[in-house]
Structure formats: structure tokens, C-alpha cells
Image: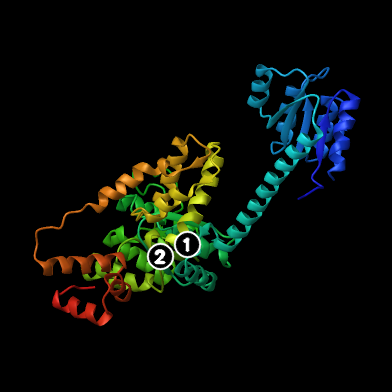
């Protein structure tokens, strides 16, 4: 126990003040005293007291006012109000304004020792938990990516290896898996970290708007173009441009982007002068681009230009060991943002979160945690705060087998597994519980192109 954590005793009665200080010093604590509220505030500004004993009735600034000012200066301090005039009203007022305890004169030295010991043990536990959280954060956190999953750790190691290269990166994964976070980790780990990181959602804009957004435009290029405007590629010069949902761009933009990748230059919309840039391109998609190429929806030459370094992010259901880490992180961050006092998540609630399949991945988990915090009425998130999620999971599991031949069911299962694993035959065969060679045979049998 940290006996050097300081304690402050505030009382206008010298005998009472010194007696209590003497009792606490005998227990080995460092104790300061103040005869009034003003002196207490002066001492509090200079010293981070763990516990403050404050007399309720004092001339000038009374105990409640002193407590409120001390808590404004040192919000973590535990305040104990002392009074010879014990009433229900004063007790309620003291607790309402933030007092942790309320004791009545004459004080019992043994009672004081036990009270301080209990508070100190709690503070020690808080301190140890904070240190542990920081250690876990350092151990499992990398550029806002929180994980202890082995596949994710391999991906993070790869981001370090390729961070300072100019090679194009293609990040694949389901929606909500954190593709932009990985892109940022690559950028901010490398030699371009001091340069811009520009993110563009290719699915959010029409072809015409996206073209102007990416390449900029000249004055008079179209109605409303009152002045020249730089595009995202120019703004990202020297840094990185992140093209999210690259699989959704039109054929014309695919051709324009291919030229930028090949020559590192382009024309603004309505312009005749080439613009040259030094930009690293990181693209992301939740589609299987190899399949899109086979279906004629994506240019093969662009696909190979983008797919120099490929990163496939696992969905959250395949990294369930990360759910407690992510949930705790979201609780702390969201509570801070919303000003809610929710300490943690109970064991049963965590078990429920771990068991859920998370079709929306990490983004869905974050939204679920926020909803639970907003509706939470206790200091801890319990399984009841996620009861609606449990019902949703149970409902989704009550599926009906379609009335089709067994071969058709098997064919659909294989296609679904390949889609979930982004065309990776090894992973799909593992998910289906069969050998790779068996899966290849079935692919031929059902004429499934992968």
C-alpha cells in the first residue's frame, strides 16, 4: 500500500484537526492540515491529495463549498465530510455534491483507520488496473488497431515491412473490418508519415463527381466551376491516397486510374496540362476483384496493378479473442465522449458478445456498445443491456433449409465459403471441413469459377 499518498484534514477546531492528523500519521500516512477552506484550496492546488477530511461547519467557506472547489481542482480525490451536527438532510446534500463518506464527531480513531485503509486499497487497485490497461494497450494496439489475433499480428508486421515502399497495396475484407485503419497504419509507419493521407470513398459519388474529386478541374470545365480546384491526387502529393471500395468505380475511371498508376500523371477535368504527382495508392474493397475481372466488371490490367501487395483482413467472427479488448476500448472511449459513467462489461455480457457472429464486424460492435452505454442504467454493462442482440442472434440462427436437391445445397455452401474467404481455397476448404483436393474436385464438378 502507498503510505506516501497524501491526506488533507480541514477543520477550524485545532484540537480536532491535529488529533485526526496524529492518528493518521501513526498509521504511516503523510498528512497536511488546514484551518479553513481557503487554506485547503491553496494546499490542494500544490498537492494531489488522495483523501480529504473536511469539517462541514466552518466560518467563511463551509465544508460543502470547500469540497466542491477541491473536487473541481482534484476530481479524483476522495472527500469525507465530518460534522457534529448529523442530520439526514446534511448527509444527503454531502453525498449529492460528491462526498464519498460522511462521519460524525466525535470520531473513532479505529473507524478512521479502517475507512482510510479501505479507500487506499481501492485506489491502489484502480492504479494497478490503469497500469495494466496501459500495458495491454501497448501490447495489443498499433496505430488504433487493437488485436491479439495471430493473423492480425502477421498483417500488422507486414504493414511495418511495406510502410516505406511505394508499391500499391490492395486491402480486402468485409465491411467494417477496419480496412482504412490498416491503410493509415501503413502510411503513418513509413517515410510518408509527415505527408498527407487522403481517403476517398469511391462508392459514395457518381462517376462525374468522383472524377472531379480525384483529379480536380479547371475553371469553366462545367457549370459551377468558377475556379480551378485541385483533386485528391494533387492534395495527396508526397503522401498516400486511400481509395475505398475501389471495386465500385466505372469503366472510364478504371482506365483513368490505370494511367495514373502507370505514369504518375493525369489531366484535370477540362484541362490540357498534365499534372505529375508522387502518390502511393492504397485501395480497398469488400468484393472479390478476381471474380469481378472474370465477370467483365473490372479491368484485368488494373487489377494486377492494384494487387501488387495484397492484405486480406479476417472478419471479427474469426478473431473472437479480440472482442473483449475491442469492447473495453469502445466502452472507455464512448463513455468519455458521452460523459457516461460505465465502468466495464460483465462476464455474461462479454460471453454474449463473443458468441455473436458480427456480420457488420468491428463497426457493428462499436455501434452495439454505444447503444448499450446510452441505455445503461447501472455502472456496468450487463447481459441485459445486450438482450436485444441475443434475440437477434437467435432469430438469425432459426433458418429454414430451402426445398432444393442436396447437390444444389452443397454447391451453394461452397460458393458461400469461397465468398467469405475471398476466393482463398485453402481457407474455404478448412471452413467446410474438407481437404483442399476434395474442394478442387467439387469446384470442377459444379463448374464453380473461383
- How many labels, in total? 2
Q: Check residue 326 in the rendering and tell me which mark sits there, or answer none.
A: none
- Residue 149: x, y in percent? 47, 66
Label 1 SS: helix
Query: In the rendered image, which residue does mark 2 sit on?
Result: 313
Query: In the rendered image, which residue does mark 1 sit on?
Result: 182
Query: In the rendered image of this protein, does residue 155 appear above or below residue 101?
Result: below
- Residue 272: x, y in percent? 39, 59
Name the residue at 50% across, 48% down: 330
Name the foreground residue: 143 vs 264.
143
Give residue 255's quadrant in the image.
Answer: bottom left
Q: Counting other residues with Cα less than 10 Å from the Cα at mark 1, is it few (<14), some (14-19), or many (20 or more)? A: many
Name the foreground residue: 283 vs 433.
433
Q: CA distance from mark 2 to mark 1?
A: 9 Å
- Residue 379: x, y in percent? 53, 38
Is the C-beta separation of discs 2 and 1 under 8 Å?
A: yes
Quick check: 267 left or right of 3? left
Name the residue at 26% across, 71% down: 432
Name the residue at 31% across, 51% down: 208
Q: Quadrant of the C terminus?
A: bottom left
Amino acid at each position: 500500500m502507498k503510505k506516501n499518498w497524501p491526506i488533507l484534514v480541514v477543520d477550524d477546531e485545532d484540537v480536532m484537526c491535529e488529533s485526526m492528523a496524529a492518528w493518521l500519521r501513526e498509521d504511516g500516512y503523510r498528512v497536511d492540515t488546514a484551518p479553513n477552506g481557503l487554506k485547503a484550496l491553496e494546499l490542494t492546488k500544490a498537492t494531489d491529495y488522495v483523501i480529504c477530511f473536511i469539517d462541514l461547519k466552518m466560518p467563511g467557506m463551509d465544508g460543502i463549498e470547500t469540497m466542491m472547489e477541491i473536487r473541481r481542482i482534484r476530481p479524483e480525490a476522495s472527500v469525507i465530510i465530518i460534522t457534529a451536527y448529523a442530520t439526514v438532510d446534511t448527509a444527503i446534500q454531502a453525498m449529492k455534491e460528491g462526498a464519498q463518506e460522511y462521519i460524525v464527531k466525535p470520531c473513532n480513531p479505529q473507524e478512521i483507520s479502517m475507512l482510510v485503509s479501505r479507500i487506499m486499497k481501492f485506489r491502489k487497485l484502480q492504479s494497478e488496473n490503469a497500469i495494466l490497461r496501459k500495458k495491454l494497450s501497448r501490447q495489443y494496439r498499433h496505430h488504433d488497431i487493437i488485436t491479439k489475433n495471430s493473423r492480425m499480428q502477421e498483417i500488422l508486421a507486414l504493414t511495418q515491412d511495406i510502410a516505406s515502399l511505394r508499391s500499391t497495396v490492395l486491402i480486402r475484407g468485409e465491411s467494417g473490418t477496419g480496412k482504412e485503419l490498416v491503410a493509415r497504419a501503413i502510411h503513418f509507419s513509413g517515410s510518408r508519415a509527415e505527408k498527407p493521407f487522403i481517403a476517398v470513398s469511391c462508392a459514395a459519388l457518381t462517376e462525374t463527381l468522383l472524377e472531379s474529386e480525384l483529379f480536380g478541374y479547371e475553371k469553366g470545365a462545367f457549370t459551377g466551376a468558377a475556379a480551378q480546384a485541385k483533386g485528391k491526387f494533387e492534395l495527396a502529393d508526397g503522401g498516400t491516397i486511400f481509395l475505398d471500395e475501389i471495386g465500385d468505380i466505372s469503366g472510364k475511371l478504371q482506365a483513368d486510374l490505370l494511367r495514373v498508376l502507370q505514369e504518375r500523371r493525369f489531366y484535370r477535368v477540362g484541362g490540357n496540362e498534365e499534372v505529375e504527382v508522387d502518390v502511393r495508392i492504397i485501395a480497398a474493397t469488400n468484393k472479390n476483384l478476381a471474380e469481378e475481372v472474370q465477370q467483365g466488371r473490372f479491368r484485368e490490367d488494373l487489377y494486377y496493378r492494384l494487387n501488387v501487395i495484397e492484405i486480406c483482413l479476417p472478419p471479427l467472427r474469426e478473431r473472437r479473442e479480440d472482442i473483449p479488448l475491442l469492447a473495453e476500448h469502445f466502452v472507455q472511449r464512448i463513455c468519455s465522449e458521452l460523459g457516461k459513467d460505465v465502468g466495464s462489461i460483465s462476464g455474461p455480457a462479454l460471453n454474449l458478445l463473443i458468441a455473436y457472429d458480427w456480420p457488420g464486424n468491428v463497426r457493428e460492435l462499436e455501434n452495439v456498445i454505444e447503444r448499450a452505454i446510452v441505455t445503461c442504467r447501472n455502472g456496468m454493462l450487463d447481459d441485459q443491456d445486450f438482450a436485444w442482440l441475443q434475440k437477434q442472434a437467435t432469430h438469425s440462427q432459426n433458418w429454414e433449409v430451402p426445398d432444393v436437391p442436396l447437390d444444389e445445397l452443397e454447391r451453394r455452401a461452397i460458393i458461400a465459403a469461397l465468398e467469405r474467404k475471398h476466393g482463398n481455397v485453402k481457407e474455404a476448404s478448412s471452413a467446410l471441413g474438407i481437404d483442399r483436393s476434395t474442394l478442387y474436385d467439387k469446384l470442377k464438378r459444379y463448374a464453380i469459377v473461383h
